[in-house]
Image (cartoon, rainbow, N blue to C red):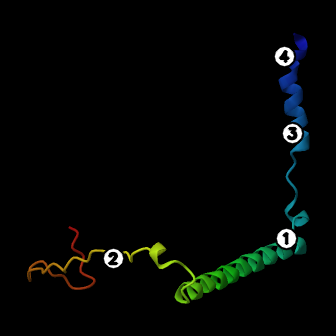
Amino acid sequence: MQVLTALPHVLTAVVSFADRTPEPEDVKAGWLAFGIFIGLILAVAFLGWSLVKQLRKVDAAEEAGLYDPSDRKPAVSLPVEPPVERSAEQRTEPGDDTRD
């Protein structure tokens, strides 16, 4: 039982010795991390370029009639409501703050 009561104190001492913060002059940005960062940017750019290329191929194949026309989905049209006319009292100029 005495070992269990001393265990928290021992663990606290071990963690305090092991968890030392490095000095600011010991820490610097590395070229390896910069290279990895640039590599990730290039990978994302390549994936975007490849995606656009594949989407253009799909559009060209659809226009060439390679897909069955019965599979074509109807175009989705969003309902457009006519603009609501406001009276002269309700109209505000840009920059006017209507919140009181």
Mark 2 and mark 1: span between their CA atoms? 48 Å
Residue type indicated by callout 4: Thr
Q: Nearer the viewer, residue 38 or 52?
A: 52
Q: Label 2: few (<14), some or many (≥20) within 10 Å?
A: few
Image quarter hosting the C terminus: bottom left
Residue with the mark numbered 3: 16
Which of disc 2 and disc 3 is earlier in sequence?
3
Residue with the mark numbered 4: 5
- Which numbered circle lies on residue 77? 2
Residue type indicated by callout 2: Ser
Residue type indicated by callout 1: Ala
Between marks 3 and 1 in the image, the one whose residue lies nearer the viewer: 1
Mark 4 and mark 3: span between their CA atoms? 18 Å
Between marks 3 and 2 in the image, the one whose residue lies nearer the viewer: 2
Mark 4 and mark 2: span between their CA atoms? 72 Å
Residue with the mark numbered 1: 33
Query: How far across and how far down the image is residue 93, in percent?
Result: 21, 85
- Mark 1 lies on a secondary structure that is helix
State the residue at coordinates (48%, 73%): 71
Between marks 1 and 4 in the image, the one whose residue lies nearer the viewer: 1
- Mark 3 lies on a secondary structure that is helix
- Mark 4 lies on a secondary structure that is helix
Q: Label 1: few (<14), some or many (≥20) within 10 Å?
A: few
State the residue at coordinates (55%, 79%): 67
Query: How far across and how far down the image is residue 63, in percent?
Result: 53, 88
Query: How far across and how far down the image is residue 48, in percent?
Result: 67, 79
Left or right? Give the position of 37 relative to 2: left
- Mark 2 lies on a secondary structure that is loop
Mark 1 and mark 4: span between their CA atoms? 44 Å
Which of disc 4 and disc 1 is earlier in sequence?
4
